[in-house]
Amino acid sequence: MQRYALFSLSKKSKEFVDLARILIDKGISIIATEGTLRFLKDNGINALPTSILTGFESMMHAKVKTLNQLIHAMILCNRESKEELEQISNVGLIDLIVLNFYETSFENLDVFLNSLDIGGRALLNSAIKNFKYVTIIIDEKDCINIINEIKEKNEITYETKKKLAIKAFEYLINYEARAFSYFYERLTNDISLFLFLKEGIKLKYGENPHQKAYFFKYSTDEQLKYEILKGELSYNNFLDLNRVICLLGDLGENHCAIIKHTIPCGVAKGQSAKDAFLKAYSADPQSAYGGVLGISSVIDKELAEIIYNYFFDLIVAKDFDEEAFKILNKKKKTRLIKVANLGLKLEKGYNIRDVVNGILIQERDLKDIEIHEMKFVSNKKPNQEEIKDAIFAWKVVKHVFSNAITVAKNEVTLGIGSGQPNRFYSTKIALEKAGDKTKNAVLASDGFFPFRDSVDLAASKGITTIIEPGGSIRDDEIIEAANEHGIALIFTGVRCFRH
């Protein structure tokens, strides 16, 4: 019986041509929809139009191409059923579906409906239903593996078909979810949300030993990929890892952040990874013990030998060179994580929190502040070094629990006050941690100062620049206090609470 591979591609590439070529070598005929047929023929592939099987050309401006009973019968046929095989014996079987959907446009409802893929989704559904016999390829990256498997084994194994079917089903679900969300929102003026989570991992326990916990990956978020080089991650490790990635994403390369219970305790920029680590660690060595170390650089042997003398629960870096890994791998209780693009600014994402009877969702806070957006509202104006430190301190304070205060100098945190219900207390804690290093330092606040007491306290410790959102009904009093003390006061117009 004749065997076919059906190609229907919106996104076309050389890999699909290579696949078609080896299929022909193995006696499988290629059939294709109109645009794909031209593409294959232009690349020397002897492909046939689907009309050879169906007996009719595409209709209605190509909206109807593969919606055909015979095509779906050739896909859905049970290869172990004599009765079903006899019904299509005069046409053959479709053993491979090679397709991807054309892009859906969300410009407006009419354009959306016109761009909605119909035939491809139907083909995918039929192929998934019969994946034991039909190989589904939706990604050009899979072509080389298929080609090699055919060359080596003269077949496509069940295990490979299974993996490809799962990938195709995920592709279909994500397409359907995006389409439904837009359709629902346009027709109801309401909002819908689909969360597709996969690769669930059961963790040892949650925040506390009596709590069960799991980790699931988003199916479509490929911004940052991490590799666990040593150890298993706990629930709390994942929370700290997330904070390291987000904080270093805001700061960029050549920074070090030490995190404890998702709160930064020491953050620094350095001339080298070693310099950044030593500065960050010195910011709060007591809190750093047993914390999570993140470095947006490669850890080399020299730095690894230094880090080896300290205890960290988790070490996260862009990479570890061979000697560095050998050294740190000897630390029995320390987990090692490689994040190749650590320090890369995240581009999208959401914060999702469970509350009683529902969930809260907000966009991830990716807001940056720019110098031209700042308002220098005091008589004294900050110099360039103070502005640089102010921006650094502000990027750190947005990752501290509100009420949040960060004191910094020379792009190194000196003291961090976190999670106090009173902003004055957070200010007091940050300044006390900074000790006698506060002269000519900057202070950042995640929210406006409701009273001048924090400014007065900061001035008594030698703070020369304060950066905060502004927006209080007492802003005039805050500006007056800054002027009295000769402090440069910067309003960002941007609040950065974290709860």
Image (tube, grey):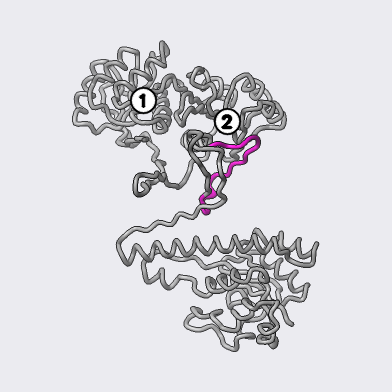
- Residue in view at x 50 percent, y 41 percent: 212
Marks 2, 1: nearer the viewer:
2
Left or right position of 137 against 423: right
User: Residue 31, image x and y in percent?
Assistant: 65, 78
- Of all residues, the one furthest to the front in this rendering is 210
Name the quadrant of the C terminus. top left
**Helix or strand or loop: what does disc 1 sit on?**
strand
**Helix or strand or loop: what does disc 2 sit on?**
strand
Mark 2 / mark 1, whichever is N-terminal? 2
What segment is highlighted magenta in the picture?
218-234
User: Residue 369, image x and y in percent?
Assistant: 37, 36
Q: Compared to 328, does 198 lie above or below?
A: below
Cβ atoms under marks 2 and 1 closer than 8 Å: no
Secondary structure mainly formed by the magenta segment: loop
Label 1 sits on residue? 405
Tally of numbered discs: 2
User: Residue 4, image x and y in percent?
Assistant: 69, 77
Inspect the image, locate mark 1, and give the three-letter code of the amino acid beneath it: Ile
- Residue in view at x 24 percent, y 33 percent: 471
Residue 132: quadrant of the picture: bottom right
Q: Compared to 359, does 184 lie above or below?
A: below
Magenta-colored stretch includes residue 228: yes
- Residue in view at x 46 percent, y 21 percent: 410
**Disc ID at residue 314:** 2
Separation of disc 2 and disc 1 at Cα?
Answer: 25 Å
